Image: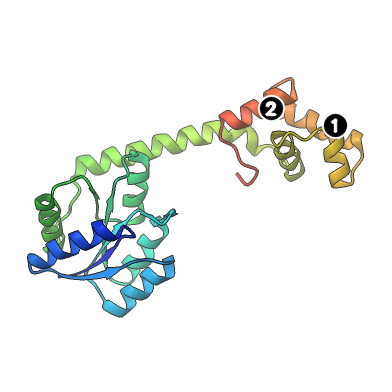
């Protein structure tokens, strides 16, 4: 089995690589500078398995799972992440399993050997648990953001400006439209969000974790 170990924590990665090599597993290190470097390493070394840290230098490695699988690898996430929704997203993207960085080396080795044998790392029960958590999170997100979906592009821009602390006069001056037009847009935002003040609209947007691009 050839494992591509992708982790930007030098000490953790080197310790793990040495331990795995001691068990007769071929390990190739990849210290990612950018996501393309990981895919280049896969193309170059043709590993059977990619052991992928979820957080690489502040970047989320989730988008790397599907391209790695398309290149014929199985992907196992190695992470300290505990948010079940995030872990579920990894499995949804195609990861064979998710291993905790806090797990013992013996368990990690056992899991990798199972992958090498083509076994499933996740039980049906665990998959169902992750899937249920993801569905619930997305349903909750949809519920939170539904009122904002009715906003037009200009209304979203106005709401974003209000969240930044801009007044109607400032918005009008910056967007080169009349003050009455901006006030009409603000009124439409309040109506669609079911609130009666600009302050309440801003509070609702922040509580829903809304962003103008949503």
Category of crowding for the residue at label 1, using alpha-carbon neighbours closer than 10 angstroms: few (below 14), some (14–19), many (at least 20): some
Task: Please state if 76 lies on the left or on the right of 151 as rendered.
Answer: left
Task: Please state if 29 lies on the left or on the right of 148 as rendered.
Answer: left
**Mark 2 vs 1: CB contact within 8 A:** no
Q: Position of residue 133 (x, y in %)?
A: 35, 36
Front residue of this view, candidates 206 and 58: 58
- Quadrant of image for the C terminus: top right
What mark, if any, has residue 183 been given in the picture? 1
Q: Label 2 vs label 1: CA separation?
A: 14 Å
Front residue of this view, candidates 181 and 22: 22
Q: In this view, does 201 lie above or below 51?
A: above
Residue occupying image coordinates x 31% and y 51%: 91
Q: Where is residue 165 in the image (x, y as percent from the top left)?
A: 73, 33
Residue occupying image coordinates x 29% and y 46%: 80
Category of crowding for the residue at label 2, using alpha-carbon neighbours closer than 10 angstroms: few (below 14), some (14–19), many (at least 20): many
Task: Please state if 4 lies on the left or on the right of 211 as rendered.
Answer: left
- Quadrant of image for the N terminus: bottom left
SS at circle 2: helix
Q: Residue furthest front?
A: 11
What mark, if any, has residue 201 been given in the picture? 2
Residue occupying image coordinates x 35% and y 60%: 65
Q: In this view, does 192 lie above or below 109?
A: above
Q: Where is residue 118 in the image (x, y as percent from the top left)?
A: 15, 62
Of mark 2 and mark 1, the one earlier in the sequence is 1
Front residue of this view, candidates 159 and 21: 21
Q: Where is residue 64 in the image (x, y as percent from the top left)?
A: 39, 62
């Amino acid at each position: 089995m050839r494992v591509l170990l992708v982790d930007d924590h030098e000490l953790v990665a080197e310790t793990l690589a040495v331990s795995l090599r001691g068990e007769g597993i071929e390990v190739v290190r990849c210290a990612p500078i950018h996501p393309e470097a990981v895919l280049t390493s896969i193309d170059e070394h043709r590993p059977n398995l990619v052991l992928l840290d979820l957080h690489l230098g502040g970047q989320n490695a989730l988008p790397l799972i599907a391209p790695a699988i398309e290149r014929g690898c199985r992907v196992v996430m190695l992470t300290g992440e505990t948010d079940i929704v995030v872990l579920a997203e990894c499995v949804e993207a195609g990861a064979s399993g998710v291993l905790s960085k806090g797990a013992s080396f013996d368990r990690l080795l056992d899991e990798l050997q199972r992958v090498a044998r083509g076994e499933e790392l996740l039980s049906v029960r665990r998959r169902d648990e992750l899937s249920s958590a993801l569905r619930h999170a997305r349903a909750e997100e949809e519920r939170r953001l539904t009122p904002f979906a009715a906003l037009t592009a200009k209304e979203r821009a106005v709401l974003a400006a209000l969240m930044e602390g801009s007044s109607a006069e400032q918005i009008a001056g910056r967007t080169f439209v009349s003050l009455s037009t901006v006030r009409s847009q603000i009124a439409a935002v309040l109506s669609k969000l079911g609130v009666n003040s600009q302050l309440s609209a801003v509070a609702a947007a922040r509580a829903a974790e809304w962003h103008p691009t949503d």
